[in-house]
């Protein structure tokens, strides 16, 4: 058996890899498997830790670059886990022949993103491989932060509401079009952004159950995983889900489903109904959450994520087998 | 200007990259630059953090593999920084077409190494890139641990002694010969091993000043960096430095200098003279330190690392410009 592109998709094959290989040998801490960050105890204090390697192609794209993406992604993984991001390490794998000017732009972008988000780059490493053994550069970012409020799909209850913090699919479409395989111009920018200033203030709200940033595999994959871990279902209302006209247009043209497209500056937030309005208001008062919407609710149908379509039909959402857009992050 | 293989050597070009690019944009914490791990404060407790990407070629080699190497390397970076390693994250970049059986061996090797060393693998990530955009697999490991005793070259004083914990150059030679570019059989194994059980017990000893694992760039590079940061010099006695006969033989044949070859299971330890014997004894009572030797002393000659050769000559050691063995780790 060999590794396939789909093993990096965040979908069904990635899941198989995690369950059949990594969980066989690694015993991750409690609440950790299939989550974005792990809860650890060090010096008798709770911290969260997360790691991601970034192989996005191309490494410059409308709305960002691999530097901004990697720092944002790590900040977001910590934040949606109920932690305040504090420190990030950066590991570069550079391809021989990479232009220094490109590397400098990316390093600057990482520093700017970290500074704006108020987190520190704490450690670094650089390796160089021969031409043809990389694709410009790959970046690993690993982050740690203080846990403020541990979150888990297991804390959700039927009747909870599902909020998304804004338009979905922007990152996927921006990357797809940046590859110049299609001659389409839309002006859609990647949404990649650090979400700690948007989401950390929600951690004080009692009714907050769980958050996740819908990156690889998109909104659908994240909610399917939520459903599997919580043992609950989700009902989504298609007409409530914010999708830009241009994104919908490209999806129709190229056969993508926006529900499965990667986002890099959005979160799904599951909340107790009683606090939904407060949370929605908080989100909408922030530039990165102004298009937040309640898009669905948690049900007691085990392992069932269902889309109520605009014309009133129903469609069960499943993990994707194939990766519609490899190397999206 | 373009990235060259030498930028990953750990030598002069790596230094330039760090000083001219990374330090320009990233402001690393105090005592951190050019060190193996950073000291951070989280929840008002001191922790150390370190990151490394591993691109070693081949990924299986006599004495180890990229899995054992990466876990050991991260454990060692924390330990030599005076910290007790606790948690490691693992980020994989896999090449499409990599045999699952190879991946499984490597994952198992990581799990075994972590278990033996008593540290936990806390978080993971996997990305897949197309065939021809990687070289089998690359691994990032990032580790955190509790700081027991902060160490710095700045704590050293003239008259301190320099100890190495065993034979140098084994890893470099094992990798070099594993590449099958030369038809030499020596039986030399990589020394890659986690050193926490050897070195953590030294942290209680008052006279311990500084430690470092001489990986990329070898013993010479590590001592040159020590000298630059401390503002002191080092005098090394060639005849005291433990080098295996077979390693010396291959070095003579291929034109390597063992002082610049990578080690992955050795440490250089700088100690107050008064505690040198105690430390040497502790090291020698452990399987991984049984060939430890006092190999030199700290002098007050600013920025001067000098080798006293076996025949009584003197040679000043300088950072290498070229990388004698790229992708050694």
Image: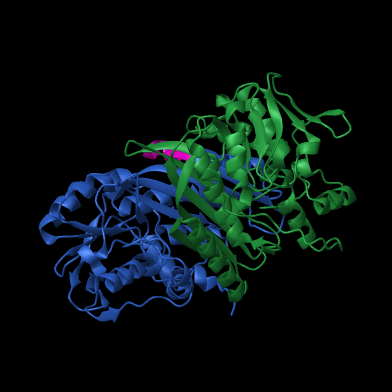
Chain colours: A blue, B green
Quadrant in which residue B16 is drawn: top right
Q: Nearer the viewer, residue A11 or A52?
A: A52
Q: Nearer the viewer, residue B220 or A190?
A: B220
Residue B82: x %, y % from top left: 50, 38
Specify start and end residues of the magenta stretch as a single range.
Answer: A112-122
Q: Is residue B208 visible?
A: yes
Quadrant in which residue A182 is drawn: bottom right
Q: Residue at x 64, y 55 (%)?
A: B192
Against A181, residue A84 (above or below) is: above
Against B269, residue A190 (above or below) is: below
Residue B152: x %, y % from top left: 55, 30
**Residue B275 located within the stretch drawn in magenta:** no
Quadrant placement of the N terminus of chain B: top right
Q: Is residue B203 left or right of residue A280?
A: right
Q: How many marks?
A: 0
Q: Is residue A191 visible?
A: no
Q: Residue at x 42, y 50 (%)?
A: A74
Q: Residue at x 69, y 28 (%)?
A: B297
Quadrant in which residue B182 is drawn: bottom right
Q: Nearer the viewer, residue A132 or A176?
A: A132
Q: Nearer the viewer, residue A171 or A44?
A: A44
Residue B310: x %, y % from top left: 85, 35
**Residue A116 located within the stretch drawn in magenta:** yes
Against A113, residue A5 (above or below) is: below
Q: Is residue A58 left or right of residue A112?
A: right
């Amino acid at each position: 058996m060999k590794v396939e592109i789909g093993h990096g998709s965040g979908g069904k094959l990635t899941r198989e890899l995690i369950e059949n290989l990594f969980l066989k040998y690694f015993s991750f801490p409690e609440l950790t498997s299939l989550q974005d960050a792990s809860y650890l105890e060090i010096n008798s204090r709770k911290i969260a830790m997360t790691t991601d390697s970034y192989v996005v192609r191309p490494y410059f794209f409308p709305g960002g670059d691999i530097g901004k993406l990697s720092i944002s992604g790590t900040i977001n993984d910590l934040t949606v886990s109920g932690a305040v991001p504090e420190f990030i390490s950066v590991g570069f794998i550079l391809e021989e022949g990479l232009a220094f000017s490109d590397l400098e732009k990316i390093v600057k972008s990482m520093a700017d993103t970290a500074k704006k988000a108020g987190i520190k780059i704490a450690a670094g490493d650089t390796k160089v491989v021969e031409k043809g053994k990389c694709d410009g550069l790959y970046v690993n970012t690993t982050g740690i932060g203080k846990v403020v409020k541990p979150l888990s799909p297991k804390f959700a209850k039927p009747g909870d509401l599902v909020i998304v913090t804004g338009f979905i699919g922007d990152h996927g479409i921006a990357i797809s079009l940046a590859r110049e395989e299609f001659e389409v111009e839309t002006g859609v920018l990647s949404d990649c952004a650090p979400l700690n200033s948007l989401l950390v203030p929600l951690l004080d709200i009692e009714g907050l159950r769980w958050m996740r940033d819908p990156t690889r595999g998109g909104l659908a994959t994240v909610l399917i995983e939520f459903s599997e871990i919580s043992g609950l279902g989700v009902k989504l209302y298609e007409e409530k889900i914010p999708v830009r006209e241009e994104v919908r247009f490209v999806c129709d043209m190229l056969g993508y489903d926006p529900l499965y497209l990667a986002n890099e500056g959005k979160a799904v937030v599951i909340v107790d109904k009683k606090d939904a309005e407060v949370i929605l208001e908080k989100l909408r008062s922030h530039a990165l959450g102004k298009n937040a919407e309640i898009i669905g609710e948690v049900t007691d149908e085990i392992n069932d994520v269902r889309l109520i379509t605009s014309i009133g039909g129903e469609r069960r959402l499943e993990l994707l087998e194939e990766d519609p857009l490899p190397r999206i992050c």
